[in-house]
Every structure is written in C-alpha cells, then in structure tokens.
Amino acid sequence: MLEQRTIVREHKNKALELMGMSETPDVINRPLLPSHDVISH
C-alpha cells in the first residue's frame, strides 16, 4: 500500500501543477483523498 500511496501522491502533485491550482499544501495535508476527487473539484 505504501508504494501505491506514493504513486497517487505524485500523480496529484503533477495534476495540480498542470492545473495551476494554489491548493497544493491543502492536498498534501490530506493524502487520503482520491486523485479523481481532487480533479473533480
């Protein structure tokens, strides 16, 4: 699970960079949220 969580976290960071969102710290503080949920917002 640790490896999978790391991959998802990296995917979120890349998605945030591409979207240019300023909520990066907020997402990092809540790594339990699924990546698709973050993108849907």
Image: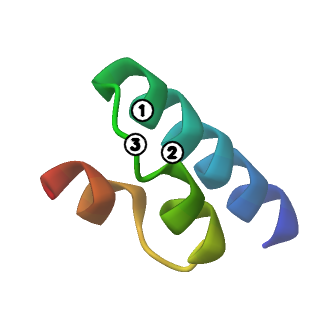
Amino acid type, residue under disc 2 in the picture:
Lys
Amino acid type, residue under disc 1 in the picture:
Ala
Query: How far is disc 1 from disc 2 in space, using C-alphas?
Result: 5 Å
Percent of width and height locating residue 29: 63, 73
For the view shown, which residue lies furthest in the front direction? 22
Please tell me which residue is depicted at 51% across the width and 63% down the height of the picture.
Answer: 27
**Residue 12 — which label?**
2
- Quickly name the residue at label 3: 22
**Residue 29 — which label?**
none
Mark 1 / mark 3, whichever is N-terminal: 1
- Quickly name the residue at label 1: 15
Please tell me which residue is depicted at 40% across the width and 56% down the height of the picture.
Answer: 35
Q: Secondary structure at mark 3?
A: loop
Q: Is residue 6 above or below residue 34?
A: above
| Mark 1 crowd level (few <14, some 14–19, many ≥20, 10 Å Cα) | some
For the view shown, which residue lies furthest in the top direction? 18
